[in-house]
Amino acid sequence: MRRTTRLTDALRKETGVPVMQEWDGWDGLAARPEAGLDGVGASLNAAREFEIINEMAGPVGTAFRRTAPTWMGVTDLRLSGELTVDDALDRVAQAGSQAVFVRSQDPEVWRRVASTEPLSTPLTAPQTLFFPLDARDPAQPMVLPGNVLWLPAPVAGDRLRMGGRYEGYTVQEQDGIATVLWSLAADTTVRIVHDQADALKFYTPDGTPIEVKKVRRGVEMVLPSLPIIVRGSNDPIIPADAFENAALKVNTLLTAVPTLADPDGREQVEVTAALSGWERNPGRASQAMWTILDRMLARSAPYLWRSADSANAAQLAGLVTRTGSSSKQVLRMAPRFGGMAEAQFKVTTRIPGNHEVWVAASVPSGAVHRLAAQFGEIVLGPAETGISGYGQGFAWYKLGSVNLIEGDHQVKVQFSANPGEEVLLDTLVLAPMNFRPDGPRPPSDWMDGALKAPANR
């Protein structure tokens, strides 16, 4: 840090111009005010317009959170695919960039850049709505109506569990905690239970107040498919039917597969506490019920769900904390000088037959093909393209399928690392079914009909 500060000061004194640094992560120098930098740069390699705002999310979020005046620029824009120069320049300007350097081997691109007008950036920075890094599933960087940038940032907050109809998160603001909610369908009428409903204020991302209808013990409103902001409570604001949905699923598991869902009776105690807590604090009781359901799903589902912290053995790997992961701890597979890192899991299959093998992990760009799973002499991989991304760079990768008999098996998740590379392994799943990942959460879509099958009891 001292070297960076001295270098920054020397460059500024010698040249008389602002000193920027390309963004180097949320914990990097570009995000730290003590580095003395005047701005943040973004290096982009984009083939489509939406990829620009996605790649600019970190640099822009860092620049807009700085208290000192900050330059924002795209220091290296490499065009690919069908993305035109004009579309790319319009998009980086909309995201708040004040300058852009375009890299290309095409003389026509050079001529187009040379003849273009200056970037039509606004005189003031666009409005921003931040979401915690852990909420990057379901929240996604984008431009919301009113030219509001929806961006990730290292702010305090939590992703909310509300089932398949709604999504949202809490976020720490200067004056307290706000809840951001939206519906996954078209505009949906919801009831929100709260003992101090008069204190709740609802806004669109650009600050426009939203009218709501007062009802007994709460309010009724139309929840849109774009995010709204709820202020006036430091507790999560949850639609009432989200709690009811979780309670119904919990009751279904306790009734249909009690020995799997609640082998020692502890979950029933937690369920009773969550039900009684609904009257005092609906938001927190709802999240408690979803947490209970996630634990039950991990034990009861036909798929086998193993968090990284349940590995029986690890080679050149160790546990580290990562919020936003399935169990808050992940296995860091990072041989210092390169080589094969692996994690070994013991799994017990209840349903014989073909199983899809999935892992949730944060994998370096270009290294996915070196991720594999081994069952005895059978090696599965390379991984397919990651889907259902979440948190700080995690995604789900399907490694293939394997035929397993009922009983115990040893599984090794392996990563052949180059020096300096690391994989953060979050979860291993073996599924005797078509598995559809849902970020860090055990999916519950199998429950509708699968519980009637005797093999799953």
Image (cartoon, grey):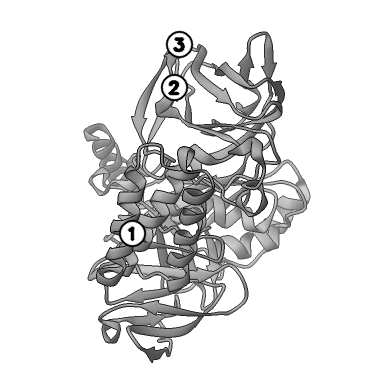
At numbered mark 3, what does the secondary structure look like: helix, strand or loop?
A: loop
Marks 2 and 1 sit apart, C-alpha to C-alpha, by 39 Å
Question: Label 2 near label 3: C-beta < 8 Å?
Answer: no
The residue tagged 1 is: 65
Question: Label 1 near label 2: C-beta < 8 Å?
Answer: no
201 in relation to 133, above or below: below
89 in relation to 270, above or below: below
Earlier residue among tags 2 and 1: 1
Is residue 146 found left or right of 4 in the rendered image? right
Earlier residue among tags 3 and 2: 2
Looking at the rendered structure, the kind of residue marked 2 is Ala
10 vs 34, nearest the viewer:
34
x then y, percent, for residue 11: 32, 41
The residue tagged 2 is: 311
Marks 3 and 1 sit apart, C-alpha to C-alpha, by 37 Å
x then y, percent, for residue 34: 23, 45
Question: Label 1 near label 3: C-beta < 8 Å?
Answer: no
